[in-house]
Amino acid sequence: MKYSRVKKLRGELTVPGDKSISHRAVMLGALAEGTTEVTNFLLGADCLSTIECFRKLGISVELLENTVRIHGKGLHGLSKPTSELDTGNSGTTTRLISGILAGQKFETFLNGDASIQTRPMKRIIEPLTQMGAQITSIRDNGCAPLHITGKSLHGIHYLSPVASAQVKSSILLAGLYADGPTSVTEPYLSRNHSEIMLRYFGADARSEGTHASVSPNPRLTGQHVHVPGDISSAAYFLAAGLMVPDSEILIKNVGINPTRDGILRVFREMGGSITLLNKRQSSGEPTADLLVKTSRLHGITVSGSIIPTLIDEVPILAVLACFAEGATVIKDAQELKVKESNRIDVMVKNLSAMGAHIRATADGMIIEGGHTLHGAQVDSCLDHRIAMSFAVAALVSEGETEILGADCVKISYPGFYTDLKQIICS
Ligand code: S3P
């Protein structure tokens, strides 16, 4: 895929459904009694991996365009799969489903693609083992493939060393099968979609600050879930709209949950003009339309509790920082090293190739903005967020940028290049 500088961006678009919420709707739909209908479901490869896993666990899932109907069988209705579960490229599927599988009366084998096989699973193996599950990393390297033998679980209180919604959710989902309450305290609050959706389906799930808890053995009931647009996908258009001269874009129906909206706060603090219109609720999740206009930007420091609320947006933030006056410092973001790729190294390498003044630090990066970027050949490393970040970088760089492995956007945003083309005025 090749991209180069554009004159302006104009128009209106809707980004696809939120990835995190789409995964959770399938999972809770499967564990609920009755039918769950999910509208505006994200038809990305990651969420399709979740559907396939639940089909193998005996759940019937109908897929009609971007509406999904899940015929739930209740908390104890899953059945032993006849083959290994394939979680593809999806960390969310792997970690959340492990929590559910930990409480089943059967054993499961779980594996994913080459990237998943390098991502840390000890972070869920440890707490789930404390709850009584038996989980082995088959290659004994703390990664998938995993062998999970479900057991009767005990409720625990877990003090998580990382602010990770995947870890928190894995434990809370296992907590549904425990003999007493289960709770998790995180260093900073991570996305809370599991807690919201557990309540929406009828569970006794509570959250207070960085503490979340769930009572065992709830009766979950099938629901209609309307998935808001994914703010992580909207972030590429927000950044493009802020950087490309003379631009104005309206992005409709975007989830603005405060545990996910850090990128809005940071872009605005950098001087970005982003207006929230038509605020409303969608299945318990706050939603709005976002109007973005070209802005003069300046660098800032981004660190601490805001990091988990924009963790997937750091690659596009790094691109935007190249166009901001002064330095942008990103700290406390060491989690980026264990995403679909090492996002600190990959961003620094690719942006440097385009002429950016950027360097990696132990827990983030420092970007000196205000230097013109030029096109280059960049490797996505098969990481969807890297590919989309460089498609945007190319729009404001001199010459042509070639993105290797550009197809990987299918993980979270299959129509990304088509939607981008629609708003380009050249
Ligand atoms: C996700 C949580 C985040 C995020 C990922 C999706 C989720 O990971 O990076 O894309 O759906 O819970 P961590 O919770 O591990 O930081």
Image (tube, rainbow, N blue to C red):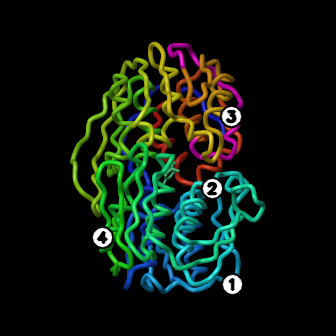
Q: Are marks 3 and 1 in contact (CB under 8 Å)?
A: no
Residue at 53% x, 25% y: name it.
Answer: 396
Residue ID for mark 4: 204
Numbered disc 3: secondary structure: strand
On screen, residue 194 versus residue 89, left or right, reads left
Tell me the kind of residue under disc 1.
Thr
Q: CA distance from mark 3 to mark 4?
A: 50 Å
Check disc 3: other Cα within 10 Å, few if <14, some if 14-19, many if 20+.
Answer: some
For marks 3 and 4, the one nearer the N-term is 4
Q: Nearer the viewer, mark 1 or mark 2?
A: 2
Q: Are marks 1 and 2 in contact (CB under 8 Å)?
A: no
Answer whether residue 369 is magenta in the image. yes
Residue ID for mark 2: 122
Residue 334 image offset from top left, x and y in percent: 57, 36
Residue 133 image offset from top left, x and y in percent: 58, 72
Residue ID for mark 3: 402
Tell me the quadrant of the picture where the N terminus can be found. top right
Quadrant of residue 97 within the rendered picture: bottom right
Check disc 2: other Cα within 10 Å, few if <14, some if 14-19, many if 20+.
Answer: some
Answer whether residue 248 is magenta in the image. no
Camera sees residue 45 = no
189 w.r.t. 222: above or below: above
